[in-house]
Image (cartoon, rainbow, N blue to C red):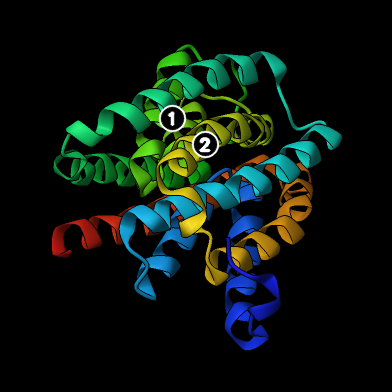
Amino acid sequence: MPDLASFDVSQILPFILIGFAAQVVDGALGMAFGVISNTALLWIGVPPAAASAGVHTVEAFTTAVSGVSHVAHRNVNWRLFLRIMIPGVIGGVLGAYVLSNIDAAIAKPFILAYLTGIGLYLLWRSLHYPPVAREPKIVEPLGLAGGFLDAAGGGGWGPVVTSNLLVQGASPRTTIGSVNTAEFFVTVTISATFLSQLGWAAFTTATAGLLIGGVLAAPFGAMLAKRVPARRLMLMVGIVLIVTSLFGLWRALHG
């Protein structure tokens, strides 16, 4: 673990700002912290495995604060929370231990293309039909898939779980709150696995900045999810999903 006294403020400040912005988006819309933060670390030259480990370590703290904030604002559907959290943890464990034997890069472009399509559908539905909340039918498989894909290091929990629950008609506010709260348990499982393999080597000045910014921003996302109208939430989820998925697709095809 790095010596905190040696941190240069000018080096850490940009990552505090990135972590703050990414967590506000993630807390309000249920996705994007991993994508934004991971991209920032890769951009400065952090190896992919270390970047993923660093982001998951940071998320263990930011999701804890975000989850508490969502609970305080009554954004959590506890039945939905349990239905996604338990298979999500199982998926995270499977992904962390099994994915080393599978070439995830082959499947990634197809997953990102699928998520882009989901984003376009959410965008269209938010503009044409007011959201009508109903109980989602397919839940546990989403938690399992989201946890598994998240462990691959490219993100997946929020985009897979939040977007597909919204497509089924789940309430945007309680879906975002429940997914964010469940993410803490999934992330802790994954980050513990990374730490057991890489130690604290992945915790750099950059990840420390993301952690500070993310923790400071975590309460604000829950406030936005509570106050922004359901139609607008769905519209913003669709836009963020399309932008991040298309960027990830471009990077997967050209990387």
Residue drawn 55% across and 48% down?
A: 57
Secondary element at tag 2: helix
> Where is 174 relative to 201, above or below?
above
In the image: residue 161, left or right of residue 47: right
Which sits earlier in the primary sequence, circle 1 or circle 2? 1
**Crowd band around label 2 with a 10 angstrom C-alpha radius: few (<14), some (14–19), many (20+):** some
**Residue at 47% in and 31% down:** 161
Q: Quadrant of residue 105?
A: top left
Q: What number of labels is visible?
A: 2
Viewer-nearest of labels 1 and 2? 2
Above/below status of 16 relative to 217: below
Which residue is the extreme one toward the bottom?
10
Residue 103 shows up from this direction: yes
Q: Is residue 232 visible?
A: no
Residue 190: x percent and y percent?
A: 47, 35
Name the spot of residue 227 as percent of width and height, x first: 78, 47
Q: Quadrant of the C terminus?
A: bottom left
Image location of residue 35, percent across then percent down: 43, 55
Q: Which residue is mark 1?
A: 147
Q: Residues within 10 Å of mark 1 (few under 14, many from 20)?
A: many
Q: Nearer the viewer, residue 102 or 228?
A: 102
Q: Give how far across and how far down residue 222 sits, in percent.
A: 75, 45
| Front in this rendered view, residue 77 or 105 | 105
Would you identify the image quadrant in which residue 132 lies? top right
Q: Relative to 185, does residue 208 appear above or below in the rendering? A: below
Q: Secondary structure at mark 1?
A: helix
Query: Which amino acid type is marked by label 2?
Result: Ala
Asked if the residue at tag 2 contacts the one at tag 1, i.e. Cβ–Cβ closer than 8 Å, the answer is no
| Mark linked to residue 192 | 2
- In the depicted view, which residue is nearer to us: 155 or 194? 194
Extreme residue toward the right, this view = 72
Type of amino acid under label 1: Gly
